[in-house]
Image: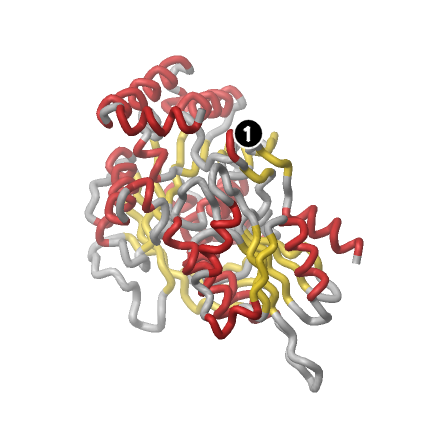
Amino acid sequence: MEKILKILRNIVPRFLISGYHFLWAFFSAAFFGFPSKKIKVIGITGTSGKTTTIELTSRILEEAGYKTAILSSIKFRINGKEKENKLRMTMPGRAIIQKFLAQAVRAGCDYAILEVTSEGVVQHRHRFIDFEAGVFMNLSPEHIESHGSFENYRKAKIRFFKKAKKIHILNADDENIEHFSELLADKKYFYGIRDGEQGFKTKTQNIELVEAREYRSLPTGLRFYINNTEFNLSLLGKFNVYNALAGICVGLSQKVDLETCSKALEKVIGMPGRMELVIKEPFKVFVDYAITPNALEQVYQIMSKFKLPSNGKPDSKMICVLGSCGGGRDRWKRPILGKLAAKYCDKVIITNEDPYDEDPKQILLEIKSGIPNKEILMTSLILDRREAIKKALELARQGDVVIITGKGCEPSICLANNQKILWDDREVVRQEFKKI
């Protein structure tokens, strides 16, 4: 079936395919009565951080007394009732989104918060949704094969903001900000981390700024100030400051004060599959979703701080398990992922992730190709993901850190012909840990 679809995509003119997606978006919205006109919809887009930002935004709005619905890569939640997103799609099809919005309306929700992807925009999944606000997180290379170039990838994101014209919430510190800052909107919020007296990197003037000052990374999380309000998060990594700022800006745009935002964020204890600590002792085991080079490097930099000092004993190690998605997705990044793993990790185990219709052995070899020859002895190729996790746990000693990336809390491994294997990295870690 997949081969037939690929053939059709190659022979059918693009304008016909685009027209099909557009019409399907219209009829889906019409069938469910254009539900976005009866609820405020927040669209969050960017290469990394969308899922976490959706959760933080929802918590802020709920702290203010609003009822929310969220649709993320890992869950559907409507007014507190939650179910797992088993579709393995960050932004599902048009009918699914419109049905979700209609259900949120019926449940009496005030807000619906969605992840908006570049491929979803190309397929008009954002059409006929009346967005209250569009949030821009960040941009780094992804889906290059699908879009043809990074510029086209960026243009797809821009197309979303051209449709969501009410409120724009933009990361002023991202190097792509100038492509978004001049787009028309009724109101704009720019957020970023204030570095001394230098201010934001962007040169844009006459905008409403939300500045995180006195940012500190603490062993237990993060701390920063906006104006005179203190924010404390039990999350790790500077990127989570940006995720929090995006959610805070949504709150401010909806008349939620900073004190309420702070109270909401203090109550957040971790994110499923996002630098999630699964085993604490005698060594630490983390699971994270990171799939892009930029995200992976940030995770490795943070994880390296968890290694214990030697104190006369052999130095603690960081043991990394990683793979890369198949299906022709972003093959360019595979050697880069391998190179990053070799740079930060003491032991690298390359394993299967979601091969789809590709040869999984070839994917592993492409990742390995990025590892310098002098460090190749530190690398193992173990196709079976369970065996790879088991090996990492067996290698770990007291004080070591094991980090397993690429799937987070995803519920399955995707194979060829739409076949799936039920999976959860976290549960596999717990099962294999008990055995040792």
- Residue 412 lies, with reference to residue 21, above or below; the image says below
Q: Report whether 212 appears left or right of 271.
A: left
Decide which of 407, 30 is in the foreground and name it: 407
Please say whether residue 68 is visible from this viewpoint: no
Eyeballing the image, is 365 above or below 216?
above
Q: Which residue lies most toward the right here? A: 435
According to the picture, the residue beneath numbered tag 1 turns out to be 78
Dividing the picture into quadrants, the one containing residue 382 is bottom right
The amino acid type, in three-letter code, at marker 1 is: Ile
Left or right: residue 127 compared with residue 73: left
Residue at x 63%, y 62% (from the top left corner): 402
Quarter placement of the C terminus? bottom right
Q: Is residue 168 visible?
A: yes
Q: Nearer the viewer, residue 276 or 390?
A: 390
Q: Position of residue 322 (x, y in %)?
A: 54, 55
User: Quarter of the image holding residue 419?
Assistant: top right
Q: Report whether 161 appears left or right of 249.
A: left
Residue at the bottom extreme of this rendering: 312
The residue that appears at 43% across and 44% down in the rendered structure is 251
> 348 left or right of 23?
right
* Residue at figure coordinates x 37%, y 53% from the top left: 332
Q: Could you tell me which secondary element the residue under label 1 belongs to? A: strand
